[in-house]
Image: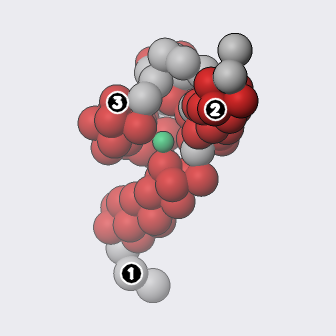
Amino acid sequence: MTEQDESERVVARVLGPEGPEVSCETCFEELDRYVELELAGVDADAAIPGLRAHLEGCPACHDDHESLLSLVASDALPAE
Ligand SMILES: [Zn+2]
């Protein structure tokens, strides 16, 4: 194994989320539904397995989730 192979493997490991089942693309597609389930009081983690793990392991999707959650929540509640 060359040194370059080794460093590529390390990069792949660092970039890859913990759960291999949900990619950023899938996360992006399911995020709307996930947030709606969360706000409806449904167990969103059970409905979309792996997504929560992805959000916890992926800062970009974590941020997306936070902003979508606050957006939808402020939309659902009447302004004070
Ligand atoms: Zn992601």
Tell me the colour scheme of the image.
Answer: secondary structure
Q: Quadrant of residue 2?
A: top right
Q: Amino acid at mark 1?
A: Ala
Disc number lying in front (1 or 2): 2
Tell me which residue sits at (36%, 73%) in the image: 78
List x then y, in percent, for residue 16. Answer: 58, 31
Query: Residues under labels 3 and 2: Cα distance?
Result: 30 Å
Q: Is residue 13 visible?
A: no
Image: 42 above or below 60 = above
State the CA–CA distance, disc 1 to disc 2.
Answer: 56 Å
User: What residue is pinned by disc 2?
Assistant: 4
Give residue 17's quadrant in the image. top right
Q: Relative to residue 65, is residue 1 drawn left or right? A: right
Residue furthest out toward the left: 29
Total labels: the figure holds 3
Disc 1 residue lies near ligand 1 with CB under 8 A: no
Q: Residues within 10 Å of mark 3 (few under 14, many from 20)?
A: few
The reply to whether residue 24 is visible in this rendering is: yes
**Image quarter of the N terminus:** top right
Q: Residue furthest bottom?
A: 80
Residue in the picture at 54% in, 18% down: 20
Location of mark 3 (residue): 26
- Precedes in sequence: disc 3 or disc 1: 3
What x and y, as percent, mark residue 15?
59, 39
Looking at the rendered structure, the kind of residue marked 2 is Gln
* Proximity of marks 3 and 1: CB atoms separated by less than 8 Å: no
Residue at image position (62%, 25%) is: 5
- Specify which label sits upstream in the sequence, 1 or 2: 2
As rendered, which of 48 and 80 lies closer to the eye?
A: 48
Residue that numbered label 1 is attached to: 79
